[in-house]
Image (spheres, rainbow, N blue to C red):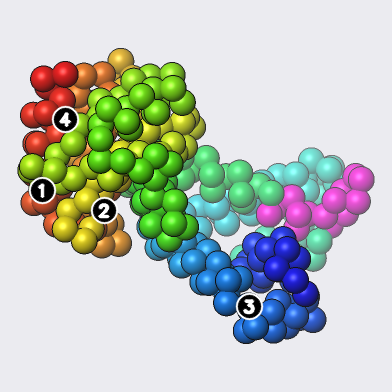
Amino acid sequence: MNCEEATKLMDGYLDGELDPITSQTIEQHLRECHKCDRAYKMNGSLIRAIGNATPYYKAPAELRDRIQASLREEIAERSRRSSGPVPRDARPLITKKQAEPRSIPFGTSWNWLALAAAVVFAAIIAWNVLPRLQRPGNDQFLATQLIAGHVRSLMANHLTDVASSDQHTVKPWLDAKLDFAPAVVDLSSEGFPLIGGRLDYLDNRPVAALIYQRRKHFINLFVWPAAPDETRTPKTITRQGYQLLHWVNSDFNYWAVSDVSDNDLQAFKQQFEAQTSHH
Protein backbone atom coordinates (compact mmCIF):
# COMPACT_ATOMS: atom_id res chain seq x y z
CA MET A 1 0.00 0.00 0.00
CA ASN A 2 1.32 3.44 -0.94
CA CYS A 3 0.67 6.82 0.69
CA GLU A 4 -2.06 7.81 -1.79
CA GLU A 5 -4.06 4.64 -1.08
CA ALA A 6 -3.58 5.01 2.67
CA THR A 7 -4.82 8.62 2.56
CA LYS A 8 -7.99 7.63 0.70
CA LEU A 9 -8.77 4.93 3.24
CA MET A 10 -7.74 6.89 6.34
CA ASP A 11 -11.22 8.21 7.20
CA GLY A 12 -12.72 4.74 6.98
CA TYR A 13 -9.92 3.33 9.13
CA LEU A 14 -10.42 6.02 11.79
CA ASP A 15 -14.15 5.28 11.86
CA GLY A 16 -13.62 1.51 12.07
CA GLU A 17 -15.45 0.90 8.79
CA LEU A 18 -12.81 -1.21 6.98
CA ASP A 19 -12.52 -4.98 6.86
CA PRO A 20 -9.82 -6.61 9.01
CA ILE A 21 -7.46 -7.35 6.12
CA THR A 22 -7.50 -3.75 4.83
CA SER A 23 -7.09 -2.45 8.37
CA GLN A 24 -4.03 -4.64 8.90
CA THR A 25 -2.57 -3.41 5.62
CA ILE A 26 -3.00 0.22 6.67
CA GLU A 27 -1.50 -0.50 10.10
CA GLN A 28 1.55 -2.04 8.45
CA HIS A 29 1.90 1.02 6.22
CA LEU A 30 1.62 3.36 9.23
CA ARG A 31 4.42 1.50 10.97
CA GLU A 32 6.65 2.00 7.94
CA CYS A 33 5.65 5.54 6.86
CA HIS A 34 6.31 8.33 9.34
CA LYS A 35 4.42 10.90 7.27
CA CYS A 36 1.18 8.91 7.12
CA ASP A 37 1.49 7.89 10.77
CA ARG A 38 1.78 11.55 11.77
CA ALA A 39 -1.30 12.44 9.68
CA TYR A 40 -3.20 9.55 11.28
CA LYS A 41 -2.35 10.73 14.81
CA MET A 42 -3.26 14.33 14.00
CA ASN A 43 -6.64 13.36 12.54
CA GLY A 44 -7.34 11.07 15.48
CA SER A 45 -6.54 13.84 17.96
CA LEU A 46 -8.81 16.24 16.08
CA ILE A 47 -11.70 13.75 16.13
CA ARG A 48 -11.27 13.25 19.89
CA ALA A 49 -11.11 17.01 20.50
CA ILE A 50 -14.34 17.59 18.58
CA GLY A 51 -16.04 14.65 20.28
CA ASN A 52 -15.05 15.81 23.76
CA ALA A 53 -16.29 19.32 23.03
CA THR A 54 -19.71 18.17 21.84
CA PRO A 55 -22.44 18.48 24.50
CA TYR A 56 -24.50 15.40 25.33
CA TYR A 57 -27.76 15.27 27.28
CA LYS A 58 -29.42 12.18 28.75
CA ALA A 59 -33.20 11.98 28.58
CA PRO A 60 -35.01 11.43 31.91
CA ALA A 61 -36.34 7.99 32.82
CA GLU A 62 -39.96 9.13 32.65
CA LEU A 63 -39.55 9.88 28.95
CA ARG A 64 -39.04 6.19 28.19
CA ASP A 65 -42.10 5.25 30.26
CA ARG A 66 -44.26 7.78 28.39
CA ILE A 67 -43.08 6.53 25.00
CA GLN A 68 -43.72 2.88 25.89
CA ALA A 69 -47.17 3.64 27.27
CA SER A 70 -48.10 5.65 24.19
CA LEU A 71 -46.89 2.90 21.85
CA ARG A 72 -48.84 0.21 23.69
CA GLU A 73 -51.99 2.29 23.38
CA GLU A 74 -51.35 3.01 19.69
CA ILE A 75 -50.65 -0.65 18.85
CA ALA A 76 -53.77 -1.79 20.70
CA GLU A 77 -55.91 0.82 18.92
CA ARG A 78 -54.57 -0.09 15.47
CA SER A 79 -55.08 -3.77 16.20
CA ARG A 80 -58.74 -3.18 17.10
CA ARG A 81 -59.34 -1.10 13.96
CA SER A 82 -57.73 -3.66 11.65
CA SER A 83 -59.33 -6.80 13.11
CA GLY A 84 -62.82 -5.42 13.79
CA PRO A 85 -64.94 -6.02 16.88
CA VAL A 86 -63.67 -8.85 19.05
CA PRO A 87 -65.45 -10.32 22.09
CA ARG A 88 -64.03 -8.84 25.26
CA ASP A 89 -62.98 -12.21 26.66
CA ALA A 90 -61.17 -13.02 23.41
CA ARG A 91 -59.10 -9.84 23.23
CA PRO A 92 -55.37 -10.29 23.88
CA LEU A 93 -53.93 -8.71 27.00
CA ILE A 94 -51.41 -5.97 26.13
CA THR A 95 -48.48 -6.00 28.52
CA LYS A 96 -45.01 -4.44 28.59
CA LYS A 97 -43.65 -7.65 27.13
CA GLN A 98 -43.15 -7.32 23.37
CA ALA A 99 -45.84 -9.16 21.43
CA GLU A 100 -45.07 -11.26 18.38
CA PRO A 101 -44.83 -9.11 15.23
CA ARG A 102 -48.11 -8.87 13.34
CA SER A 103 -48.08 -8.49 9.59
CA ILE A 104 -49.58 -5.38 8.04
CA PRO A 105 -49.81 -4.36 4.37
CA PHE A 106 -46.63 -4.24 2.26
CA GLY A 107 -44.76 -6.59 4.58
CA THR A 108 -44.03 -4.05 7.35
CA SER A 109 -44.14 -5.52 10.87
CA TRP A 110 -45.65 -4.02 13.99
CA ASN A 111 -42.13 -4.03 15.52
CA TRP A 112 -40.89 -1.67 12.82
CA LEU A 113 -43.98 0.50 13.26
CA ALA A 114 -43.32 0.70 16.99
CA LEU A 115 -39.67 1.63 16.40
CA ALA A 116 -40.55 4.38 13.94
CA ALA A 117 -43.25 5.74 16.21
CA ALA A 118 -40.83 5.72 19.15
CA VAL A 119 -38.28 7.79 17.27
CA VAL A 120 -40.86 10.36 16.14
CA PHE A 121 -42.55 10.51 19.51
CA ALA A 122 -39.25 10.91 21.37
CA ALA A 123 -38.18 13.72 19.05
CA ILE A 124 -41.47 15.57 19.53
CA ILE A 125 -41.31 15.31 23.31
CA ALA A 126 -37.62 16.23 23.51
CA TRP A 127 -38.12 19.30 21.33
CA ASN A 128 -41.47 20.63 22.50
CA VAL A 129 -42.59 19.06 25.77
CA LEU A 130 -39.43 18.78 27.88
CA PRO A 131 -37.69 22.17 28.12
CA ARG A 132 -35.75 20.94 31.14
CA LEU A 133 -33.62 18.82 28.81
CA GLN A 134 -31.86 22.08 27.93
CA ARG A 135 -31.27 21.59 24.22
CA PRO A 136 -27.83 22.76 23.09
CA GLY A 137 -28.05 26.33 21.82
CA ASN A 138 -26.49 27.79 18.72
CA ASP A 139 -23.58 29.13 20.75
CA GLN A 140 -22.72 25.65 21.99
CA PHE A 141 -22.59 24.20 18.50
CA LEU A 142 -20.65 27.23 17.28
CA ALA A 143 -18.21 26.84 20.16
CA THR A 144 -17.52 23.29 19.00
CA GLN A 145 -16.74 24.60 15.49
CA LEU A 146 -14.53 27.35 16.89
CA ILE A 147 -12.48 24.96 19.00
CA ALA A 148 -12.16 22.58 16.05
CA GLY A 149 -10.96 25.44 13.83
CA HIS A 150 -8.42 26.53 16.44
CA VAL A 151 -7.10 22.99 16.99
CA ARG A 152 -7.03 22.26 13.27
CA SER A 153 -4.96 25.36 12.57
CA LEU A 154 -2.35 24.27 15.11
CA MET A 155 -2.21 20.60 14.17
CA ALA A 156 -2.34 20.84 10.38
CA ASN A 157 0.43 23.45 10.18
CA HIS A 158 -2.06 25.87 8.65
CA LEU A 159 -1.99 28.67 11.17
CA THR A 160 -1.91 31.41 8.51
CA ASP A 161 -2.56 31.95 4.80
CA VAL A 162 -0.68 35.23 4.93
CA ALA A 163 2.08 35.31 7.54
CA SER A 164 2.99 38.88 8.49
CA SER A 165 3.13 41.13 11.52
CA ASP A 166 2.27 44.09 9.29
CA GLN A 167 -1.42 44.90 9.49
CA HIS A 168 -1.15 46.72 6.16
CA THR A 169 -0.21 43.41 4.54
CA VAL A 170 -2.74 41.17 6.29
CA LYS A 171 -5.79 43.42 5.91
CA PRO A 172 -5.61 43.95 2.09
CA TRP A 173 -5.15 40.21 1.61
CA LEU A 174 -8.28 39.42 3.65
CA ASP A 175 -10.28 42.26 2.07
CA ALA A 176 -9.62 40.77 -1.39
CA LYS A 177 -10.84 37.31 -0.32
CA LEU A 178 -13.96 38.24 1.67
CA ASP A 179 -17.17 40.20 1.13
CA PHE A 180 -16.44 42.34 4.21
CA ALA A 181 -13.44 44.29 5.50
CA PRO A 182 -12.38 43.22 9.02
CA ALA A 183 -10.28 45.52 11.18
CA VAL A 184 -6.68 44.34 11.61
CA VAL A 185 -4.32 45.81 14.20
CA ASP A 186 -0.90 44.85 15.55
CA LEU A 187 -0.79 44.61 19.33
CA SER A 188 2.93 43.88 19.74
CA SER A 189 3.43 46.75 22.15
CA GLU A 190 0.64 45.33 24.34
CA GLY A 191 2.12 41.83 24.39
CA PHE A 192 -0.08 40.33 21.64
CA PRO A 193 1.93 40.46 18.39
CA LEU A 194 0.10 39.87 15.12
CA ILE A 195 1.27 36.67 13.38
CA GLY A 196 -0.91 36.80 10.26
CA GLY A 197 -4.33 35.85 8.96
CA ARG A 198 -6.18 33.15 7.07
CA LEU A 199 -9.60 32.24 5.70
CA ASP A 200 -11.83 29.86 7.63
CA TYR A 201 -15.42 28.64 7.42
CA LEU A 202 -17.77 28.96 10.39
CA ASP A 203 -21.48 29.38 11.01
CA ASN A 204 -22.20 28.50 7.35
CA ARG A 205 -20.06 31.29 5.88
CA PRO A 206 -16.43 32.29 5.14
CA VAL A 207 -14.83 34.21 7.99
CA ALA A 208 -11.55 35.97 8.73
CA ALA A 209 -9.17 34.43 11.25
CA LEU A 210 -6.59 36.80 12.74
CA ILE A 211 -3.72 35.11 14.55
CA TYR A 212 -2.10 36.69 17.59
CA GLN A 213 0.51 35.33 19.98
CA ARG A 214 0.73 35.50 23.76
CA ARG A 215 4.14 34.25 24.84
CA LYS A 216 4.14 30.62 23.52
CA HIS A 217 0.38 30.48 22.97
CA PHE A 218 -1.68 31.43 19.94
CA ILE A 219 -5.02 33.24 19.81
CA ASN A 220 -7.39 32.68 16.90
CA LEU A 221 -9.66 35.71 16.50
CA PHE A 222 -12.55 34.79 14.16
CA VAL A 223 -14.37 37.75 12.60
CA TRP A 224 -17.52 38.03 10.46
CA PRO A 225 -20.43 40.49 10.12
CA ALA A 226 -22.97 40.51 12.94
CA ALA A 227 -26.70 40.09 12.34
CA PRO A 228 -28.94 43.09 13.14
CA ASP A 229 -30.43 41.27 16.15
CA GLU A 230 -27.08 39.97 17.40
CA THR A 231 -26.69 40.01 21.19
CA ARG A 232 -24.23 42.72 22.14
CA THR A 233 -23.45 41.40 25.61
CA PRO A 234 -19.96 39.81 25.81
CA LYS A 235 -19.91 36.17 26.79
CA THR A 236 -17.23 33.68 27.82
CA ILE A 237 -17.16 29.91 27.46
CA THR A 238 -14.62 27.49 28.97
CA ARG A 239 -14.47 24.05 27.42
CA GLN A 240 -11.87 21.31 27.35
CA GLY A 241 -9.10 23.63 28.50
CA TYR A 242 -9.90 26.33 25.92
CA GLN A 243 -11.16 29.84 26.60
CA LEU A 244 -13.67 31.38 24.21
CA LEU A 245 -14.60 35.05 24.37
CA HIS A 246 -17.33 36.61 22.22
CA TRP A 247 -18.21 40.24 21.68
CA VAL A 248 -19.83 42.40 19.01
CA ASN A 249 -18.34 45.74 18.02
CA SER A 250 -18.70 47.94 14.94
CA ASP A 251 -21.18 45.52 13.38
CA PHE A 252 -18.77 42.58 13.54
CA ASN A 253 -18.84 39.31 15.45
CA TYR A 254 -15.61 38.56 17.29
CA TRP A 255 -14.78 35.16 18.77
CA ALA A 256 -11.35 34.78 20.40
CA VAL A 257 -10.23 31.19 21.06
CA SER A 258 -7.08 30.13 22.88
CA ASP A 259 -5.64 28.11 25.75
CA VAL A 260 -4.34 31.25 27.47
CA SER A 261 -5.86 32.29 30.79
CA ASP A 262 -9.17 34.09 30.97
CA ASN A 263 -7.38 37.22 32.22
CA ASP A 264 -5.07 37.21 29.19
CA LEU A 265 -7.99 36.79 26.81
CA GLN A 266 -9.90 39.62 28.49
CA ALA A 267 -6.80 41.83 28.25
CA PHE A 268 -6.49 40.96 24.56
CA LYS A 269 -10.12 41.97 23.96
CA GLN A 270 -9.63 45.29 25.72
CA GLN A 271 -6.48 46.11 23.75
CA PHE A 272 -8.07 45.06 20.44
CA GLU A 273 -11.16 47.20 21.09
CA ALA A 274 -9.00 50.16 22.12
CA GLN A 275 -7.04 49.97 18.87
CA THR A 276 -9.97 49.33 16.54
CA SER A 277 -12.02 52.18 18.02
CA HIS A 278 -9.57 54.58 16.36
CA HIS A 279 -10.05 53.04 12.88
Give the CA distance from mark 4 to mark 2: 25 Å
In the image, residue 162 lies in the stretch drawn in magenta: no
The magenta span reads: 102-115
Give the CA distance from mark 4 to mark 3: 50 Å
Q: Residue at x 50, y 58 (%)?
A: 64
Check disc 2: other Cα within 10 Å, few if <14, some if 14-19, many if 20+: many
Q: Which mark is residue 218?
A: 2
In the image, residue 110 lies in the stretch drawn in magenta: yes
Q: Quadrant of residue 183?
A: top left
Give the CA distance from mark 3 to mark 2: 30 Å
How many numbered callouts? 4
Given the image, on which type of amino acid does mark 2 rest? Phe
User: Viewer-proximal residue, 253 or 62?
Assistant: 253
Whichever of callouts 3 and 2 sits on the residue coming sooner in the sequence is 3
Left or right of 48? Residue 274 is left
| Image depth: mark 1 or mark 4 in front | 1
Q: Secondary structure at mark 1?
A: loop
Q: Which mark is residue 33?
A: 3
Whichever of callouts 4 and 3 sits on the residue coming sooner in the sequence is 3
**275 versus 165 height, above or below:** above
